Image (cartoon, grey):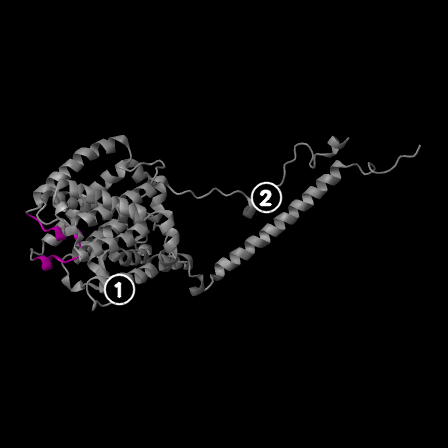
Amino acid sequence: MTSSLRPLRPHGARKAPPPPDRQARPSRQRDAFFDNAKYLAIVLVGVGHAWGQILDGNRTVETLYRVLYTFHMPAFIIVSGYFSRSFDLSPKRVKRLITGVAVPYVVFEVAYALHRRVSEDPGNDISLLDPTYLLWFLCALFVWRLTTPIWQTVRHPLPIALAIAALASVTPTIGNDLNMQRVLQFLPCFVLGLVLRPEHFQLVRRRAARILSVPVLAAAVAVAWWSVPRMETGWFYRNAAVQDTGAPWWTGPVLTLALFGCSLVLSACFFAWVPGRRMWFTALGAGTIYGYLLHGFLVKEGTFAGWFSHPALDRPLGEIGLTVLGASVITLLCTKPVQRALRCVVEPKMDWAFKRDPGEAARGRERADRAEKAEKRETTEVREVREERVPSGAGEKVSV
């Protein structure tokens, strides 16, 4: 008897779907490949900064250093450009640019200047226009993202970016404000990331590309070994015009294009070996900015205190130990406890500093109204189905 009353809708009728705001949305999962790439790239950055302190007279370390500096920052910048494709100068994106790039730059620029005052130079000035050490990347990222709509509008963005980089290499009057030489000379790597699509990364992740990358890397090491006594290491930093090195002017555009080509090839080799599945370090890819900003304090303190002058670092075992230490330290700085402790300065929310987006508020009200109407409609449908299933005289007493 009761079983006949249990169904609330007629046979074959389907329950009304929940309103859009209550439907299960597919969760936006992070791509393990890109998190792995960001983590491995930031580890190489830390290792490169450690090697940079022991280059004098060590041809082997300088060879590896040059190979590393050819691709580790370009690869990181390419990924940054790839994830900047959605930047559109909307209030939400601009807010994220300010809180995620501009504010950390100001905070850490002041922090690095104060650190130098305490450790080396009490008269060191605080200058927001002259990025300290590795903070040039935040300046560059701020400028690059602001110009993203331009690169997504013009017809041939990459050739234009290469032309700008080549011109910057022969323009010493650009000066050091915001480290604009690096901003402009690394610009093609960012623009390349903007124009890449997922299928392009799939191409370099094939087994054939992985196999081919081995002889390519070996050739790069051989060329780097040959270049040590013949080429200034400063070229790999891309932070000066050719006139500042005393070389002929035409070498600027030539080396700009050559370095970009080498960076592209070695970055492809790097991406070929990045695992696409979740690894023990995949979660650390979300905290690479923490490792990047913090490890510089240790490198600078080691330089000020003379840690890198220890005789043990002149021997192969010491060099290997420094490499492992650099990779381990930057790994620890990317972990969740560090992120939780410093999120207030690296990724602050700062809702108090921004106007509320009228469009977002209107969309929120519209979603709430739509959800309320859908709920009322669902309640009405359920009531109607109940009335259809229960006969009108089922509850009345039958007289005999």
Residue 339: give its label: none
Of 184 and 109, which appears nearest the observer? 109
The amino acid type, in three-letter code, at marker 2 is Pro
Which residue lies at the image location 27% right of the left edge and 39% below the top edge? 271
Of 75 and 264, which appears nearest the observer? 75
Q: Residues within 10 Å of mark 2 (few under 14, many from 20)?
A: few
Point out residue 316 in the picture as x, y percentages from the top left corner: 13, 40
Residue at numbered disc 1: 114
Point out residue 236 in the picture as x, y percentages from the top left corner: 16, 50
Q: Quadrant of residue 183?
A: bottom left
The amino acid type, in three-letter code, at marker 1 is Leu
Residue at numbered disc 2: 18
Question: Which one is closest to the eye, mark 1 or mark 2?
Answer: 1
Q: Quadrant of the N terminus?
A: top right
Residue 194 in view of the camera: no
- Answer left or right for 389 relative to 304: right
Q: Quadrant of residue 209?
A: top left
Q: Magenta residues?
A: 230-245
Q: Earlier in the sequence, mark 1 or mark 2?
A: 2
Q: Please report contact status of discs 1 and 2: CB closer than 8 Å, yes or no.
A: no
